[in-house]
Image (spheres, grey):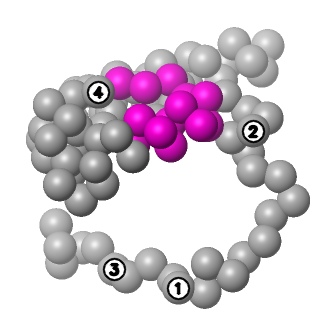
Amino acid sequence: MADSQVPWGVDSLGGTISEPAWKTKPSWYPPFSTEDKMIPPPAQRLMSKRAGSTVVEEKGSHAIYVSQPKAVASIIVKAVEGVKKVAM
């Protein structure tokens, strides 16, 4: 997994936006792992709550997409269904 990941662009820190999408559009927080050692679960709870996101917590490591793929797929399906409802 480390071989496929690349450093993110530090230039993105200087970007500006007029209004964050999470303030006006529904959001879903990917399943966060209750045992994450990179991003503490309390921080993830705070970020997802601040964004008003639908949240799913799963037991697993930081690489939740690898350790809990069914949970990740499930929240993606729920997000698609939620967006369809908003669009109609």
Q: Secondary structure at mark 4?
A: strand
Compared to 37, does 6 lie above or below? Answer: below
Res 1 quadrant in image: bottom left
Report the Cα–Cα distance between label 1 and label 3.
Answer: 12 Å
* Mark 4 vs 2, N-terminal side: 2
Q: Which residue is mark 1?
A: 10
Q: Secondary structure at mark 1?
A: helix
Residue 33 position, x and y percent, is: 23, 38
Magenta extent: 44-56
Q: Which residue is mark 2?
A: 23
Report the Cα–Cα distance between label 3 and label 4.
Answer: 26 Å
Which of the two discs, 1 and 3, sits closer to the camera? 1
Q: Which residue is mark 3?
A: 6
Report the Cα–Cα distance between label 4 and label 2.
Answer: 22 Å
Residue 18 visible in this rendered orientation of the protein: yes
Which residue is drawn at the image coordinates 61% and 29% (left, top)? Answer: 52
* Mark 3 vs 4, N-terminal side: 3
Which residue is drawn at the image coordinates 67% and 18% (left, top)? Answer: 84
